[in-house]
Image (cartoon, helix red, strand yellow):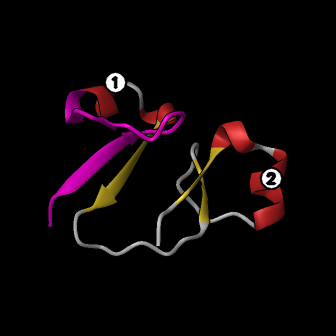
Amino acid sequence: MSKRHRDAKNGQFVTETTARRRPATTLSETVGGGATGRERSTKTGQFVPNGTAKRKPSTTVTEDK
């Protein structure tokens, strides 16, 4: 499956080149992988508790359901 890449700060799609150049501020997602509606760390891509997302909004993103 192919991947899409997003800027972790504003959620906009970016090119694969940009994603490789800026891995610390880019999230990659599988196309058709489905969204969970949960919060993720922009640094690791791992799911984080809702409380962490509220305390650190600049380093977390919420997936759409």
Check disc 1: other Cα within 10 Å, few if <14, some if 14-19, many if 20+.
few
Gap in angstroms between the C-alphas marked 1 and 2: 28 Å
Q: Position of residue 42 (x, y in %)?
A: 57, 45
Out of 31 and 12, give the one closest to the viewer.
12
- Furthest residue toward front: 65
Residue stretch rendered in magenta on the structure: 1-17
Check disc 2: other Cα within 10 Å, few if <14, some if 14-19, many if 20+.
few
Tell me the amino acid under the disc marked 1: Arg
Tell me the amino acid under the disc marked 2: Lys
In this view, the mark in front (1 or 2): 2
Which residue occupies 22% across, 64% down? 31
**Which residue in the structure is indicated by mark 2?**
54
Left or right: 24 as drawn, with respect to 12? right
Which residue occupies 22% across, 36% down? 16
Disc sitting over residue 59 in the figure: none
User: Circle 1 — which element?
Assistant: helix
Which residue occupies 35% across, 75% down? 34
Disc sitting over residue 21 in the figure: 1
Left or right: 44 as drawn, with respect to 3? right
Out of 15 and 62, give the one closest to the viewer.
62
Q: Position of residue 47 (x, y in %)?
A: 61, 65
Above/below status of 3 relative to 11: below
